[in-house]
Amino acid sequence: MIRRKTELLITQFYQQDAINVAQQLIGKLLIRETKQGRLYSRIIETEAYFGEEDTACHASKGRTQRTEVMYQSGGVAYIYLIYGMYHMLNIVTGDSEHPQAVLIRGIEPLSDDLQPLPNPPKSQLKTNGPGKLCRYLSIDKQLNHWDLTLRQQLWVEDIKQQNLSIATGPRIGIDYAHPKDRDKPWRFWLKDNIYVSK
DNA sequence: CACGCGATTTGG
DNA sequence: CAAATCGCGTGT
């Protein structure tokens, strides 16, 4: 019973608009479970991509094989390859038929007891960037369409957070978008965190 | 079916 | 500042 209720809450959380989810994901726990074990991280940077009307969003080109997953109901992963070598992790949000997603741009890796790592990852294992964190978490297109509400392999957990200082600003790397979208403050990050990109 | 480019990262 | 590297969307 408790479990059912929890799953319902998680589903409802992802059915909110991408802008709301992007903001609320900051500070939450991202868990990756593979045969090698579990990796715990804290989400510290996100971006919202909202609908066909958002010219920065892949769905602005309409429904294609690639964007199909964004038309699903919130809670599944949208993962694609960019620049021929980097994977991007997104979480689909909102109701079905309204394509939107949150790009996970940065995480802070944690130890098994959920404390900041004494020795932050170096070189190949940095996590301050959407491509780097996918490399760190061994995320590729095998997890495209993955249902995060199953709470296996890849999912998000709510943890007690207080006094989070969240900053907002325009999204990165979307020069191709219409100015009205380029300027929208749909990037969110945790202030004063050494892992935030740039 | 050819072509151009991208929600990035890295090293010079 | 440019290279790496290939899937996807577009137009023929």
Image (cartoon, coloured by chain):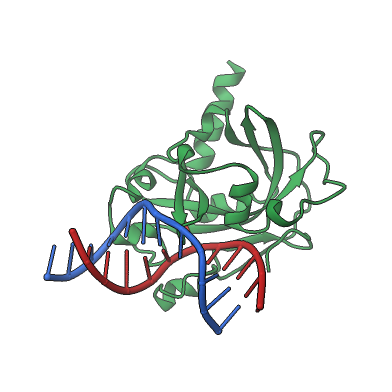
Chain colours: A green, B red, C blue
Front residue (pair A169, A45): A45
Residue A76 drawn at (x, y percent): 46, 39
Q: Is residue A52 visible?
A: no
Q: Quadrant of the N terminus of chain A?
A: top right
Q: Quadrant of the C terminus of chain A?
A: bottom right
Q: Is residue A170 visible?
A: yes
Q: Is residue A67 left or right of residue A129?
A: left
**Which image quadrant for residue B9?**
bottom right
Q: Is residue A98 left or right of residue A194?
A: left
Looking at the image, which residue is at 46% across and 47% down?
A: A79
Front residue (pair A193, A118): A118
Residue A3 drawn at (x, y percent): 59, 20
Q: Is residue A195 left or right of residue A170?
A: right
Front residue (pair A27, A134): A134
Residue A143 drawn at (x, y percent): 48, 38
The tally of labels here is 0
Residue A45 drawn at (x, y percent): 64, 57
Q: Residue furthest top?
A: A1
**Which image quadrant for residue A145?**
top left
Vertical arrangement, residue A62 with respect to residue A136, above or below: below
Looking at the image, which residue is at 51% across and 41% down?
A: A14
Looking at the image, which residue is at 43% across and 78% down?
A: A179
